[in-house]
């Protein structure tokens, strides 16, 4: 026989359940408020003790009420929070199974697709899906098998609340981890989100794709076009995430297609621009901005991305030369309709000019002396110029281990690469340091390094003799004729490299390369020849 205390507890449980069954909408709302307040954070054993080992009886009533009333949004948010107390409790596996057996996942996913339901209720639904997904691989697969990825992705694109969108990102991130059967499905769903109209959804999708990419290890063929289109956004936070993803993607098999796409964006297609103009002008609700603005935003972002890639990896910079990047950058500099394209293209071209003497030579010829002086002005030499020697004259043995810190005294003006601290293996063609013209034969390797560090340290004295950058402000000094010269330039670095021959041209560009690097770069040279034929 049960004790008096047990009988009293059972009586209280039955009375509570009867009160719930007989309550109306307002009364049930009060019951849910009290339940949430008193039971938040409790474990499964504590809930059982609270309900006299009959907690499942109340959970069944909650799930039944959810399935009946979710369409009308009656106490929906409170219902979901109450169910969440059961599902998120420690040792709550039994409650989770009971909820799933009555179609809980399908109900939660359907809630996300209903327009009449409030955003807060949908947010609670997402949180319950997070709890289910975090319970193990089997439950992640159940969500995906219920067409969950599509429903969740569509909700992310349509949601108007950034907080809710961030919760959805957490859910998608959970689904891509520890879910080998359906991780590719999640990855494709994220890529499909990139063309959506919500900037926040684009930003979160790009972030999650980076995570998924490292897990999956292979790329989807459509990712290149989708990422390049995102570069046309006006939102800098989205553009930043797109460039960060591009930096990751160059390490995969889409590297060549990605680099080609970036270079192609530097010169917008006249045909595409005319199509865009007709579409915008036909819609009276759209402000009459420049009709080709999205194309020019892509152009500017592509120039920026190319600069980031080139500064991070010298081999990528060399590959871009074979893809006619210099011609494209100069053409973008001549775009008088979009000053940001001019500015970013000018900064990136400055980077190539300072990296490769051959590029500097051809850019000077293509621009003409007067325009080139506007682009990169060299300070006049002083009487001490005899003691200024290029770093590439340091003996080869000593050069092999010396590294130049671009964040020293010259900083932005010398390097053209911004104020970030980065190290380049010497020789760096645009950088000169004050060293003895003839180092003593017995100079040790450590002494040579000390000389380089001493020469690069900030010291009082005459102005720096390094080339002074004017690239960032060049667009403000261009007239229409100079802009036309840039836009119609015929600079062809690839042709010059081909005429000199592979190994010789690589030595001109940047020191020596090993055989593997030479073979890899020769692939781009041969491909360019075939395309010309």
Image: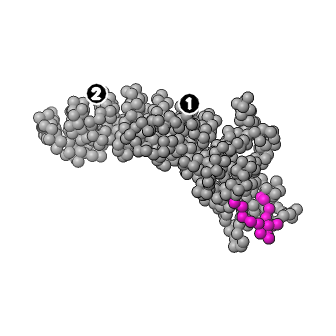
Q: Label 1: few (<14), some or many (≥20) within 10 Å?
A: few
Residue under the point 57% across and 49% down: 336
Label 1 vs label 2: CA separation?
Answer: 39 Å
Residue 439, picture quadrant:
bottom right
Q: Position of residue 182 (x, y in %)?
A: 46, 29
Q: Which-is-in-front pick, marks 1 and 2?
A: 1
Name the image quarter holding the C terminus: top right
Q: Is residue 182 above or below residue 208?
A: above
Q: Secondary structure at mark 1?
A: loop
Q: Label 2: few (<14), some or many (≥20) within 10 Å?
A: some
Magenta stretch: residue 3 in it?
no
Q: Is residue 54 visible?
A: no
- Residue 44 as seen in the image, left or right of residue 384: left
Name the one closer to the observer, 299 or 172: 299
Q: Secondary structure at mark 2?
A: loop
Name the one closer to the observer, 242 or 421: 242
- Residue 50 as seen in the image, left or right of residue 296: left
Residue under the point 58% across and 47% down: 335
The residue under label 1 is 221
Q: Are marks 1 and 2 in contact (CB under 8 Å)?
A: no
Q: Position of residue 108 (x, y in %)?
A: 31, 33
Q: Residue furthest front?
A: 481
Q: Which residues are magenta?
A: 377-391
Q: Is residue 13 above or below residue 452?
A: above
Q: Position of residue 97 (x, y in %)?
A: 32, 30
Residue under the point 77% across and 41% down: 496
The residue under label 2 is 102
């Amino acid at each position: 026989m049960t004790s008096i205390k047990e009988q009293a507890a059972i009586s209280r449980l039955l009375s509570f359940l009867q009160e719930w069954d007989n309550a109306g909408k307002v009364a049930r709302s009060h019951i849910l408020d009290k339940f949430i307040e008193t039971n938040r954070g409790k474990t499964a054993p504590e809930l059982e003790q609270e309900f006299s080992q009959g907690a499942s009886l109340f959970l069944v009533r909650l799930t039944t009420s959810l399935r009946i009333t979710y369409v009308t949004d009656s106490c929906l948010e409170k219902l979901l929070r109450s169910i969440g107390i059961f599902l998120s409790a420690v040792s709550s596996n039994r409650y989770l199974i009971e909820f799933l057996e009555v179609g809980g996942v399908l109900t939660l996913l359907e809630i996300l697709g209903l327009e009449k339901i409030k955003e807060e209720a949908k947010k609670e639904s997402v949180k319950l899906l997070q709890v289910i997904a975090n319970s193990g691989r089997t439950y992640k697969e159940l969500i995906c098998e219920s067409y969950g990825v599509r429903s969740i992705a569509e909700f992310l694109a349509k949601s108007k609340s950034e907080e809710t969108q961030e919760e959805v990102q957490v859910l998608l991130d959970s689904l891509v981890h520890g879910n080998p059967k359906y991780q590719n499905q999640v990855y494709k769903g994220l890529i499909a989100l990139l063309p959506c109209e919500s900037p926040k959804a684009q930003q979160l999708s790009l972030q999650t794709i980076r995570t998924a990419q490292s897990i999956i290890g292979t790329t989807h063929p459509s990712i290149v076009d989708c990422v390049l289109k995102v570069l046309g956004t006006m939102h800098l936070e989205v553009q930043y995430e797109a460039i960060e993803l591009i930096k990751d993607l160059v390490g995969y098999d889409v590297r060549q297609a990605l680099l080609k796409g970036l270079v192609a964006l530097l010169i917008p297609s006249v045909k595409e621009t005319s199509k865009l103009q007709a579409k915008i002008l036909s819609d009276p609700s759209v402000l009459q901005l420049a009709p080709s603005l999205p194309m020019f935003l892509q152009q500017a972002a592509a120039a920026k991305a190319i600069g980031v890639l080139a500064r991070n990896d010298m081999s990528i910079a060399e590959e871009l030369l074979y893809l006619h990047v210099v011609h494209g950058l100069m053409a973008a500099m001549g775009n008088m309709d979009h000053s940001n394209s001019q500015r970013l293209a000018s900064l990136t071209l400055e980077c190539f000019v300072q990296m490769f003497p051959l590029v500097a030579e051809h850019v000077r010829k293509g621009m003409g002396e007067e325009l080139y002086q506007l682009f990169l002005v060299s300070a006049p030499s002083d009487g001490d110029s005899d003691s200024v020697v290029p770093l590439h004259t340091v003996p080869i043995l000593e050069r092999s281990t010396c590294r130049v810190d671009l964040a020293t005294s010259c900083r932005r003006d010398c390097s053209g690469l911004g104020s970030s601290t980065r190290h380049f293996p010497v020789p760096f063609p645009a950088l000169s340091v004050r060293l003895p013209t003839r180092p003593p034969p017995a100079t040790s390797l450590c002494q040579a390094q000390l000389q380089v560090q001493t020469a690069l340290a900030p010291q009082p004295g005459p102005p720096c003799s390094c080339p002074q950058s004017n690239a960032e402000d060049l667009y403000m000094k261009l007239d229409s004729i100079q802009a036309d010269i840039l836009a119609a330039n015929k600079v062809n670095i690839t042709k010059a490299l081909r005429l000199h021959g592979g190994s010789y041209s690589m030595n001109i560009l940047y020191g020596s390369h090993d055989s593997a690097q030479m073979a890899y770069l020769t692939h781009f040279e041969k491909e360019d020849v075939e395309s010309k034929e």
